Image (tube, rainbow, N blue to C red):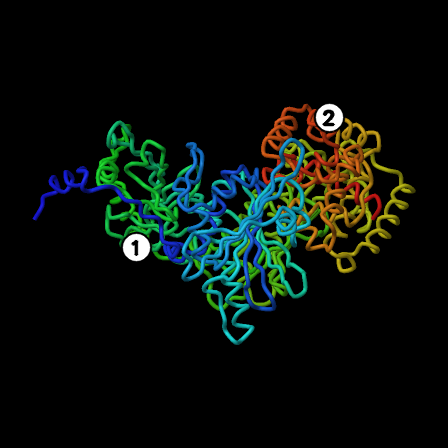
Amino acid sequence: MPTPDTRRSRRSTPESPWIVLPPDPALLLALGGGHSLESAVADIIDNSIDAQADTVRIRFLVRGASLLGMQIRDNGTGMDKATLENALRLGSRREYSSSDMGHFGIGLKNASMGYAQTLTVYTTTVVEGEQLFAGLELSPREGDTDIQARSITPDRAEEGYRFGNDVYSFGSGTVVEWAGIKGASNSPVPAERKEWLNQTIESLRLGLGLVFHRLLSAGDLRIEMDVLDLATGGSGAPRSVDPLDPFGYKVPGRRGFPVQLSAAGPGSTEVRATCHILPPKGHDKLPGKKVDWQGLYIYRNNRLLTLKAGWHGLVAPKNDLKLARVEIELTDDLLPYASPTPEKNDVTLKPEYGNALMAAADAASGGDFVGYLDQAVSVWKDSNKRSTAKPITEIGSGLPSDVVNGLCDSFGWRANKEPVDIVWREIAEDDLFKVDLADRTLTINSLYSDVFGGEDTPSSFLFSTLLYLLTEANFTRESHLRTSTLDHLEQIDTALLAAIHASNDDAPSIDFKGMPQDALAALLTASRRQPPASPVQTTPAETSTSMRPGDSLPSEEVRTEDVTERASVAAETAPDALDPLEREVKHEASKTALVPPDVRRATHEKRKLPSAPLDRLDLEIFEKYCARDSITEIASALELTDNAVVKSLVLSVFGPEALEDDATLAPYHGMLYTPEERSRILLAYKTADDPYSAVPSVAKQVGRTPFAIAWKLLDSPKRPVPIDKHVRRSVRRRAAVLA
């Protein structure tokens, strides 16, 4: 039998010439076997990121309840015809930079052929001011003798690029279209096909949220998904892909974690790892069980490569290690020893890399990787020794799900008790909260929401949680609260209101009921406030009127008129008669009325906030934008055009000066800008003196209209326009003027 040496010598002799073995066209039909749908779509999005896209839209094309195809659209640089042909050439490779997601040159073909019978690419780019379109179709069939693609004419390519996507019609970008989806449900029952599609979409949202969670959280990328029914031509509201961070816990399972470990790796490399221990009782953002998500999370260019966690043979997965997760950055010098798979859904570790990782240690403490694993096991075992001694009443609504889940993990729920809802609602100014056993609600006064920056801020969630823990025991009563309990709750209410006024001069003035005057004077002196004048006897109606610090006591005549007017307003704006948005408008109007016009004007001039009146629709659009809805999502929800939504937001945030436009430049709205232009716009805006009056000057710098610049700033996934509580107050007050 010939030895390896003799075999090599034979290959080099003239009698053994090299021969060319062209790829069999059937190879295309076998591509994609290692992909899941999540990894296949992620591979396409990698190309979009390499093309400097910051927005990707994934569209499911259906007819009735049957999935016929998918589109993945981006706003990157696009391609000309030659570049597109090279991209579809099997095994074609270009020069890759260290920041590129691509590496092997087969991603587009491999991902597409695994899930589609036909791959079509429509792309457009702008060259010297001219927009060029190109398209190719790849549809391999059994018996093909060559690998070939069908060229699409520029007119047909433009039509395909614009199809069903008017909002993204202009500017550079690429559409990857899959037809004939492999594995799609073909159940004869329409409801079953629809359920399969819904589950597929949700699974894809979670998978992409995990893979790109760093880019999504940083605002460098936005991914949206929707469904287009080819039978009706209508599409549903887009769904945003939210970041799914495997390290998104708040408090670690052991003090001092995470820890950084490092070791000398193979060659001249350095192996580093960030070792985490999750809280044993904390709610995990990842679906399923913690035990399935232990192991190594390997990233390259802020993109997760390990879609399924595991230890890659370093240690055996086990239940005791369910709290252990390790974060690893894969740099270029480590690629020879830790290689991503062609599908970029896993990483192959060579023994020398694994050995270096197991030997990694913390130079300061001396702790090593093996010791870290032991500590993770210890935390889990210790947590099992504890028992939940004092459960609390379940929370039905009013707090984020992760907060509720965290409370459940920490305390557990009381048995046989109806859940309690936490609601923000306008009640009397001298009440901060109310406990209602009949309705099973803890009501917090929305008049004080601005103290916490709004009703949906971390500060308000923290306050709601603490207040609930303080009052929760009262919801164990069967029917009513005793007088002594009500007195105690009133004491808590008064003390908390005093604390609010101690640090917030803008809080509504209050009457501290039921408190001795000497005690009230001492409390308010510490809070830098003055107590109401005690000699004056007031009626219940008069008690409800507010006095601001430094105000003199009004005459009897003035107070009577004031009480009459306020009683009339109260009757017109009773909570039962208004929806939440109307109540909020009325509330902002009442607060505005307490501030003299000259003070309001000075405040606007100082901050340079716009002052143009707004209507109810403007306020509704603005509130949805503050809730992180995209412009397209808002337009779909309110059945408006994107243009109408943007005009409303521009008026709210920047004022009428930013509405200046030129009809001939309409194509420059939305997504026309090249990545370089987007960078110039953001840089010019961020370096401007005032973010609310900078749009016209930025427009002059980059040669666009103010409205086009405002559109780009508002629609950027980075959200560079500061929408703080002062802006929210301004918009609500301006809407209250017309309410």
User: Is 340 located above or below residue 702 in the figure?
Assistant: below
SS at circle 2: helix
Question: Farthest residue toward the left?
Answer: 1
How packed is label 2: few (under 14 Cα within 10 Å), some, or many (20 or more)? few
Q: Residue at x 14, y 38 (%)?
A: 9
- Residue 297 is left or right of residue 170, and the answer is left
- Could you tell me the amino acid type at mark 1? Lys
Q: Quadrant of residue 731?
A: top right
Q: Nearer the viewer, residue 700 or 115?
A: 115
How packed is label 1: few (under 14 Cα within 10 Å), some, or many (20 or more)? few
Q: Quadrant of residue 359?
A: top left
SS at circle 1: helix
User: Is 434 located above or below residue 717 in the figure?
Assistant: below
Q: Nearer the viewer, residue 283 or 465?
A: 283
How far apart, in angstroms, are the residues tagged by discs 2 and 1?
Answer: 67 Å
Residue marked by disc 2: 700
- Residue 616 is left or right of residue 244, and the answer is right
Q: Quadrant of residue 515?
A: top right
- Residue 239 is left or right of residue 140, and the answer is right
Across and down, in percent, residue 32 comes to 40, 54
Which badge, 2 or 1, comes first in the chain's sequence?
A: 1
Residue marked by disc 1: 385
Across and down, in percent, residue 191 comes to 55, 72
On residue 543, the disc is none
- Could you tell me the amino acid type at mark 2? Lys
